[in-house]
Image (cartoon, grey):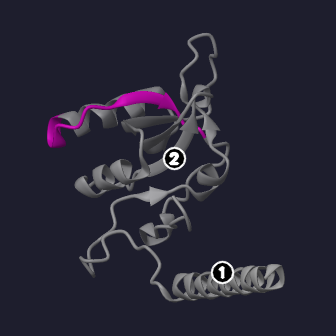
Amino acid sequence: MKAKRTLALLRMIKNITALFVVLLAAGTGLTLYLPQFQPDSNGAGQHIHYQINQDSLKKPLLMSTTLLDPLEQQASGFGLRLGLFSQLAQAIRQGQAYSLAQIPDIVKVTDEQRYWYLLILGPYPSEDLAHQQSFQLEEKHGISTTLIRWPFAEKKAASSETAKVKMPSAP
C-alpha cells in the first residue's frame, strides 16, 4: 500500500515536472517569435520626433549633473528641458507631440530615490543661445522650457543620423 502511494507520488512529480518543462519551452518559444516593440508601430512611415539615449537607460545619470551651478563660471554646454516624466512611455508620447527642427533626447536620470526621464534639447554652446531658443519655443510653439546643464561630456552629432530611435529591449 505504501509502495503504491510512493509510486503515485513519483508519477505526479514526474507529470508536474514535464508540465513545467513544456510551459517553459512554450514561453521561451513565444518570446523569441513575438515582434519587438516599436514605438508608433501602428503609424508606419511617420517621422520620429525624439531620440532615446541608450547609455542612460543602462546607467542612469544623476539628476544633479543637469543642474546649473551658479558658482561654476565655465559651463561646457546648456540644454533645454522640455519635460520631466516618471515613465518612459510618457516621455515618448511628449516627444512625439513636438514637431521641432531639432530632435529632443530622452535621458534617464535618478535623484537616488527614483528614476526620471528628461526630454531635452541641446546642446547649446552658450547660455544666451539657449535662452534665445527657449524664447522662440515659447513664442512659436507655446512650449515652456527649463535651462539645464547639458548632461553629456561629448557633443551630440549635428546630423543625429536621421533621428534613428534606439529602443531598449525592456523599458
> Does residue 144 belong to the magenta stretch?
yes
> Which quadrant would residue 135 be assigned to in this image?
top left
Residue projecting furthest to the right: 3
Question: Between 116 and 103, which is closer to the camera in this rendering?
Answer: 116
Q: Which residue is found at the position 37% from the left and 54% from the top?
A: 89
The residue where tag 2 is placed is: 107
Q: Quadrant of the N terminus?
A: bottom right
Measure how far apart labels 2 and 1 are at the Cα level: 45 Å
- Vertical placement of 87 versus 81: above or below? below
- Vertical placement of 67 versus 158: above or below? above
Q: Which residue is found at the position 21% from the left and 34% from the top?
A: 138
Question: Between 126 and 1, which is closer to the camera in this rendering?
Answer: 1
Secondary structure of the residue carrying numbered label 2? strand
Question: Between 18 and 73, which is closer to the camera in this rendering?
Answer: 18
> Which quadrant would residue 8 be assigned to in this image?
bottom right
Mark 1 Cα-neighbour bin, 10 Å: few <14, some 14–19, many ≥20:
few
Q: Earlier in the sequence, mark 2 or mark 1?
A: 1
Three-letter amino acid code of the residue under disc 1: Ile
Q: Magenta region: which residues?
A: 139-151
**Label number found at residue 16:** 1
Can residue 8 be seen at all in this image of the molecule?
yes
* Camera-nearest label, 2 or 1: 1
